[in-house]
Image (spheres, rainbow, N blue to C red):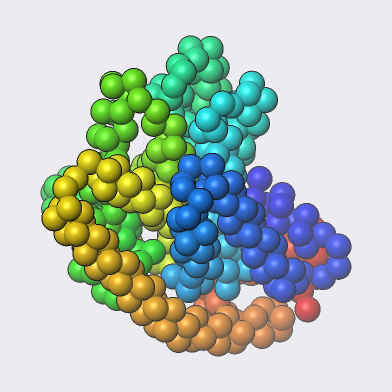
Amino acid sequence: MVGIIYLAVNRFGAWSELRENLFSVGMLTLDVAILWRLVVTTLPKQIAPYALLTMSALTFSMAHSETLIWAGAGFGWIIPDTLALFGLYLITKRSPRVSDYALGFISCAAAAVSGAFGLSALLVGFLVLLVRSPFKAWAVVAWGIGAAVVFALYMHGLEHLSKPFVVKPSEVFTVYPHYVLAYLGSALGGWQGLEMSQSIGAFGLVVFLVACVYYGRLRLRGEDAAAYLPWLALSAFVIPNALLTGYGRTALGLVQAMSSRYTTISTNLWYGDIALGVLLGIAVLKKTGAIRKQAFIALSVALVLGFIYCFVEIQIVGFGSTLALRTRMDQGMLAVRSLPYASDEQLASLYPDTNYIRDCVLKLKQAGIAIR
């Protein structure tokens, strides 16, 4: 599906990096619009604007600038992410209609066929239907059957690489968990070193797990927990992706977990954790004494300051890294435009597999898309 959208974006006129970048920005803007709907329906009015502002800043953060600057190549992350976000939003509404379930499944299924990252949306969607109130058996059965079909279609004819990228058995309980934590924390700590990213990832995972437990307690008591569900779904969407990516990429080294393009997906954990932190904070303040309230407020202020520090640091470091990447890409595009006369050394500044570049350019020409 990503390939179809890519061709559609470039079908009229020559290949345009600007057109692809504008499309990516448009998809991210749609993400913010979906987050706005979630924020205004689940968080207090006094806090909602600040929460949305924070989430919007994360959406357009330099942490995942690689996804944007890669133009069309970034579609493989942005499109499944937006489709998954939209699908999960629909099925976590307080009172979803049949059409919401249907469109939600279609959106999550489209995310799945757009990239491996989207497969997690179908799994999380199924779990949402299992735990949401009121429980609708027909929705669980229909979603389960549909998800099984999509998974089967995805796996059919899938070629398995012979390269030894997958995690080694000896690293399952040692290196692999560190990769997963670094992946989860990369949206806030990716430019600040491996240990920082792992620490932030561990914190984000703890917040999610605490919220899961509290949601379960509210449900058992028969209390209203609908506000928690969409944010739990967004955070949960990241976990299988972290595990799957770690399984296939741990052998490449832990630093690879902090690749800028991965943060387009892992940022969803922080969308969820920000809102869950607000909801949990409100619950704590309602049930604690004055001294504990003061301690909790002090802790909250420290976390906000820590977030601001990490975010600002990411923008500063990320901007410099992006400029360097932009320079290499410009050099590579000059080589592409001079094909077939460009050397492999010139093309390598764009992508290490120069034969792959030549093959892609040939396919673009066959599709009637010029490169200027």
Left or right, 272 with respect to 195, comes to right
In terms of image quadrants, where is residue 96?
A: top right
Left or right, 98 with respect to 47, comes to right
Above or below for 322 versus 148 = below
Left or right, 143 with respect to 167, comes to right
Q: Residue at x 44, y 32 (%)?
A: 226
Question: For this rendering, which residue is in front, 348 or 8?
Answer: 8
Q: Residue at x 13, y 55 (%)?
A: 291
Residue 251 in view in this figure: no
Above or below for 305 versus 42 = below
Q: Residue at x 58, y 35 (%)?
A: 90
Q: Position of residue 276 (x, y in %)?
A: 36, 47
Q: Position of residue 175 (x, y in %)?
A: 18, 56
Q: Residue at x 55, y 87 (%)?
A: 327
Question: For this rendering, which residue is in front, 155 or 261?
Answer: 261
Q: Position of residue 216 (x, y in %)?
A: 29, 28
Which quarter of the rendering shows the C terminus?
Answer: bottom right
Q: Among all residues in the image, which is located at the extreme right?
A: 12
Residue 144 in view in this figure: yes
